[in-house]
Every structure is written in C-alpha cells, then in structure tokens.
Image (spheres, rainbow, N blue to C red):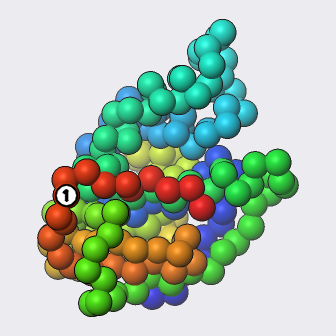
Amino acid sequence: MEFQVYCGAMDGLVLIDRGSMKELDADLLYAFDILLDCSGTSELIYDFPDEDWHTVWVRETEALRKFCNSGKMIVWLFDAKLKGKTQNGKNKNGVFQIDDALTDSDKWLYAPTGNLLAVTASELIQCLAYPELEMEEVFSLSVSKGWYAISDRGVEEIKYCKGNPSTSTFKNIQEV
C-alpha cells in the first residue's frame, strides 16, 4: 500500500491498532506532546521552569515510552531531521507492505482488533482530545489479529510480518 505523509517539525507517524487507542488518556496525550518536542523548542518548556529539557523529556515521557515499547504503538519522530532546517516540513511518499521473510525485528506491534491505523501524531493527539473532530488518516488496513514484526527504512518503506516476538521489550520509537 502506498501512502503520503506530511513530515512537519514536532510531529511523527504513528502506527497503532484501533483497539489500543482507547488506552491513550489525557496524561498519555500530554506526554505525547512532550515526546514530539525532542529539542525543547515549544511552549511546553514553560510548564517546567528552571528544569533541563532532556531531564523533563525523559521523566515526562516514561509512561508513553513504556506504552509504545510494550507493542501497543510505533512512532517515527520527524523532529530529528528537521532540527535547524525549515519548520515547513515536506511530504514524503512511503509504502507499507507485507514481507513474509521478515523474521526478527526490534519493533513489534500488537493488533488485538486487526484494524491498523497510520496517522500523524499531531492528528492523533488532536482527535483523541476532541472526539468530535474527524481524523485524517494516512492509511488504514485490516489484518489478522496478533503480533506483527515491523521493519523500516524510515517512513519511506515499512514492512510487516505476522509472528511471535522473541522478547517482551521493543524499540517502538524511532527518529527519522
């Protein structure tokens, strides 16, 4: 499946099963805002006066990072490559495709409903905070329920394969 995503500063691409979205409460959404601000350049820094942003970032995103790294969500952060460049971002073309040869990965996603959703992080945060809004999806896909190994070359090429993880902790947050 081909897709296009707008890669703006302080944003990212999220891959999640729709069944896991109900677990993203107000605290996790606030932590998500902080997660997206890797370099401490947003107004969020004023919520933590006189604190080192890296320390704040690590502390305040811990629960969200555990949520992701337990297999409930994968996030590709765009901010890292845009740092110091134009804040306008750019569109990227990508592909999400099955790869039956994928045997091992450090990224795994659990799909309890089999209804996968790819959406920008900012859109997910906004639409979960304001449920009356209609979410602009990057793509959605129905798959069999279960675990999926995820391999990528940034957001340009994402591959998935049904399987069983060999470990219980994953690296589901990546800077691209």
Q: Is residue 41 visible?
A: yes
Q: How many marks?
A: 1
Q: Residue furthest top?
A: 50
Residue 85 in the image: x percent, y percent? 83, 54
Q: Which residue is mark 1?
A: 167
Residue at 72% x, 33% y is 41
Residue 26 in the image: x percent, y percent? 38, 32
Residue at 66% x, 51% y is 79
For the C terminus, the quadrant is bottom right
Residue 84 in the image: x percent, y percent? 82, 48
Front position in the image: 144 or 157: 157
Q: Is residue 75 left or right of residue 146?
A: right
Residue at 56% x, 55% y is 175
The relative height of residue 62 versus residue 20 in the rendered view (above or below) is above
As helix, strand or loop, the secondary structure at mark 1 comes to loop
Front position in the image: 49 or 126: 49
Front position in the image: 35 or 5: 35
